[in-house]
Image: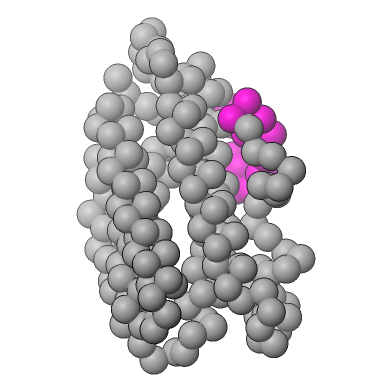
Amino acid sequence: MLLTDQVLINLLKQAYSAEKAAAFAYQGHAGSVKDKDEKRAIRQIETDEWNHRAEVLKLMNLYKVPVSRWYELKYHIIGKNISASCYVIGWFMPFYFAGNLESGNVCEYIRMKRHFNALGIIAHDEVLYEMSLKEKEHEVYFYEGIKNSKWLPFFEKVFGWGSKKRKNDIDLEEGFLIENTNGYCDGYGENKRTSVILSNEIPQK
């Protein structure tokens, strides 16, 4: 079964490699913090990212999407550099940029779901929903850690994420249900063209 939706193919390739970069970054982040509870929480987030990488690879294998060597190299270097920087840039910035990153990652999995659904494929709805939900929980965790920092207003103004600006429109307190996921992140990096799948067989739940 082959996909010809190049946007979806690239989303899968990029997400697979970017999850490695995130996991590497959280290794350094966890190592740099002193608080035991923070260290434990960040290590769990690292584990979540490795799990997401494994789930994305399953989808890639199912649709015969090859791993991008370029993305693997690019995100390996990025992840290792971020990991090392956590030991020298202080406490606030690793929390801030992690929250900023996770805020965008929420929409990447919703976009994947929307593209699959446009092809009539619903078999992956649950796993993509769960991953987007987990990324949102990560965002909330990092935001809660810095919401009272004096640096937040400045960083929010410069980098576009903080108490008032987010890269997704999900509010967990209002509820985030799987049946409503395609209504979120409207316009976030979307390509409006029609997608095509070369197969008459649609995977079922």
Quarter of the figure with the C terminus? top left
Q: Position of residue 161 (x, y in %)?
A: 66, 68
Main SS of residues in magenta = loop
Q: Which residues are the magenta region?
A: 178-195
The extreme top residue here reads: 200
Q: Position of residue 49 (x, y in %)?
A: 36, 54
Is residue 180 in the magenta section? yes
- Please determine whether, in this image, residue 191 is positioned above or below residue 72: above
Q: Position of residue 24 (x, y in %)?
A: 30, 67
Task: State the residue at coordinates (29%, 74%).
Answer: 80
Q: Position of residue 146 (x, y in %)?
A: 61, 76
Lateral position of residue 148 relative to residue 118, left or right: right
The extreme front residue here reads: 36
Task: State the residue at coordinates (57%, 47%).
Answer: 107
- Please determine whether, in this image, residue 80 is positioned above or below residue 178: below
Task: State the residue at coordinates (27%, 50%).
Answer: 68
- 53 or 146, which lies in front? 146
Lateral position of residue 30 relative to residue 178, left or right: left
Is residue 158 in the magenta section? no
Quarter of the figure with the N terminus? top left
Task: State the residue at coordinates (66%, 47%).
Answer: 172
- 183 or 175, which lies in front? 175
Coloration mode: one colour
From this viewpoint, is residue 112 visible?
A: no
From this viewpoint, is residue 196 visible?
A: yes
- Please determine whether, in this image, residue 190 is positioned above or below residue 3: below
